[in-house]
Image (spheres, rainbow, N blue to C red):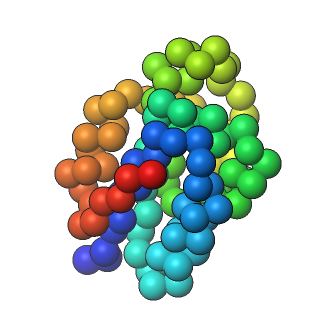
Amino acid sequence: MAISLGIFVSSDQHLDKIIKLCRAANKKNIKVLIFFTHLGILLTRDPGFKELEGMAEMALCKVSLESHGLKKILIPGIDEKDYTTQAKHAEIIEECDRYMVF
């Protein structure tokens, strides 16, 4: 079974570190799952966010999106089903071998 890494992102900082971490994990065939919430959803507006597409399964908290006055837009790597709730975050915690918080 493949090793997996869950990443919880609640900060609007450190996108560069998250990208580097995903690259390193991908080189070692580690499955990466990321959940964006609170201020972390603001990273979806960063031009560099598109670099994460294809490196990780990503989801974001739709309540956080709405609470920051943001609307659903086309975000690289985020499908309609990926606008979700904290229940998805709980699934990531349960599923992953390792878990990090940013």
Above or below residue 28? Residue 61 is: above
Picture coordinates of residue 11, whole percent (x, y): 51, 42
Quadrant of the rendering where the N terminus is positioned: bottom left
Above or below residue 22? Residue 88 is: above
Q: How many numbered callouts? A: 0
Picture coordinates of residue 56, whole percent (x, y): 52, 60
Residue appearing at x 29%, y 32% in the figure = 87
Res. 81 visible in picture: no
Above or below residue 9? Residue 38 is: above
Res. 39 visible in picture: yes
Residue appearing at x 55%, y 61% in the figure = 18
Specify whether 57 is left or right of 74.
left
Residue appearing at x 70%, y 60% in the figure = 51
Q: Nearer the viewer, residue 21 or 86?
A: 21
Furthest residue toward right: 47
Q: Nearer the viewer, residue 96 or 46?
A: 46
**Quadrant housing residue 89:** top left
Residue appearing at x 25%, y 50% in the figure = 93
Picture coordinates of residue 6, whole percent (x, y): 36, 58
Furthest residue toward bottom: 28
Picture coordinates of residue 98, whole percent (x, y): 28, 65
Q: Nearer the viewer, residue 1 or 55?
A: 55
Specify whether 12 is left or right of 33.
right
Specify whether 24 is left or right of 91.
right
